[in-house]
Image (cartoon, grey):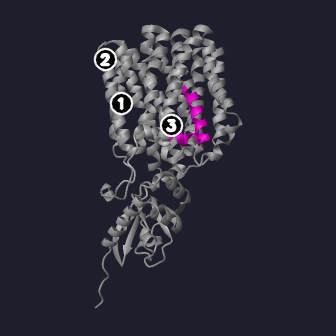
Amino acid sequence: MLVYAFDHGGATEAGVVAVVQLVPAAIAGPVLSVFADRGPPARTLCRGYLAQSVLLAVVAVVLIGDGPRYLAYGLAALVTAALTITRPTQTALVPFLARRPEELTASNVLLGWNESVGMVAAPAGTGVLLATVGPGWVFAVGAGALLLSTLLVRPLEPPSTETDEDAGDVPDLAAPPGAVSELRSGIGALRQEKAARMLLFVLATMFTALGALDVVTVILALDVLGLGQGAPGYLNACFGLGGVAAILITATFVGRPKLIPWVIAAAAAWGGAFLVLGLRASVVAAVVLLVAAGVSYMVFNVACRTLLQRSAPADIVSRVFGLMEAVGAIGLAAGSALVPLIVSAVGVEAAVIGTGAVLPVSLLLCGRALLHIDEHATVPVVEIALLRCVHFLQVLPAPELESLARSLVRVDAEAGQVLTTEGDVGDRFYVIAQGEVDTWTRGAYLRRLHRGGSFGEIALLQDVPRTATCVAAGPVTLYALEREPFIAAVTGHRRSSTLAGRLVDRRLADTPAPVSTA
């Protein structure tokens, strides 16, 4: 759309269009993110992709039909607003899919790599389409890709061992607050989290740099280097190629407790790349330095997003990332708007160097406190998501759920290993993170439990010996919760206690009667 705008009105119109597209996104991001915390994230993501696909298809029709360009600009603004639901919902969904804490970091690395591949394939494909059939077909291809995404996301509902009917007529002690109220409470909670606030600021400056880069690559390609219309796409593909190469670095983040040193190094490399590019603008320099900038961006992005996911309060993580979408949209708009002003006042060279200065300056503004962010990024996101798979625990208030998650102990077992024995004293409650567990009672086979399944609650809640023997059906990873915190949490919350009681009653009803020896 920026190339289309540049072709009709130069750098000024491209900058204005960038701002017009991003303002609705800044408003919609925090509001839409509330829905990711409310319902199943896979369902929300599926609906979001479908809405985005439809909007892109409408833009394609307008452009291919040579409709009013201002209508196309307005519709594109709706597209960017709809896109803001994606990242917060992905952030809420990934912990449900991860089986161990280190897999959360690994998933973020993989998401970053996928984003990098997209940043190569999409701009390169855009360049080809712009040079051959025009901008309308770029939007048409995007609509098709998002329709495919809708179909791929549908099977990703988080696992649950119980059904919605189990909630039955259990009354809600409090009606769910409205979206505005939830957003306000999320912002209020964020005020208490200095590390999360600082990371939001740093990510906002990253988006400002990206917004500036969007316009800088167009100006470099068409004005400075004198290349064809497809060239901005090719230069952006070079930037994306650097992001793909960054997988060699970001893959080392898995299991690494400290990520801030990588953030600082990436910001310094970003600034250096654009300093050299501003002083020596040539085709070769643009290709090499944009690849280097892509590496820096992806390292910076993955490290900061992982830290934010680790440090944000568990019950508002989607809203935090929704706020990130808002400040990101504002940052993109600011960066896109500033470049034409800098070019007009000082020149292209200053605009390029200024784009590189954004990240290093933002870190300097954070001061020494930045160095201690790693120490505060300790929220057990994966463990909380796993507990939310347990029907009678997912209704607990967020602080209690987080407290339970911090008390979990990881247990690994091999195939055939006995986890609990019928008649023994019950001391732990178990949730399955990976693998399957078979349950037996009185010599009869009961059921096989899968990921998200739980066992051990009967002995704890009714203070009786274990009622079943549980055996690992294969290699299994579980999380165990000691008796005291489990009983205190469940019995101290009316709805959780009622749901747990129903589960206990149903499982006892399914237990075979003793075999008569008469």
Of circles 2 and 3, the one toward us is: 2
Q: Which residues are magenta?
A: 186-207
Q: Which mark is residue 52?
A: 1
- The alpha-carbon separation of the residues under discs 2 and 1 comes to 16 Å
Q: Earlier in the sequence, mark 2 or mark 3?
A: 2
Q: Is residue 345 magenta?
A: no
Residue type at numbered disc 1: Gln
Q: Which mark is residue 62?
A: 2
Q: Of marks 3 and 1, which one's residue comes earlier in the chain?
A: 1
Tell me if residue 203 is in the magenta stretch.
yes
In the image as oriented, which residue stretches furthest toward the front? 174
Mark with earlier residue (2, 1): 1
The tag on residue 234 is: none
Q: Tell me the residue at 40%/43% (across/down).
A: 177
| Residue 412 in sight in this render | no
Q: Mark 2: give few (<14), some (14-19) or many (20+) Cα within 10 Å.
A: some
Category of crowding for the residue at label 1, using alpha-carbon neighbours closer than 10 angstroms: few (below 14), some (14–19), many (at least 20): many
Q: How many marks?
A: 3
Task: Please give the label number shown on residue 113.
Answer: 3
The residue lying furthest to the bottom in this view is: 518
Q: Nearer the viewer, residue 53 or 291?
A: 53
Above or below 490: residue 239: above
Q: Residue at horizontal 56%, vertical 45%?
A: 310
Rendered location of residue 250, percent (x, y): 57, 39
- Disc 3 on helix, strand or loop? helix
Q: Is residue 380 left or right of residue 490?
A: right
Q: Secondary structure at mark 2?
A: helix
Q: Position of residue 482 (x, y in %)?
A: 53, 66
Instruction: Compare residues 24 and 301 and report the one nearer the observer.
Output: 24
Inspect the image, locate mark 2, and give the three-letter code of the amino acid beneath it.
Answer: Val
Q: Which quadrant holds the N terminus?
A: top left
Estimate the x, y position of residue 336 in percent, counting from the top left.
Answer: 52, 19
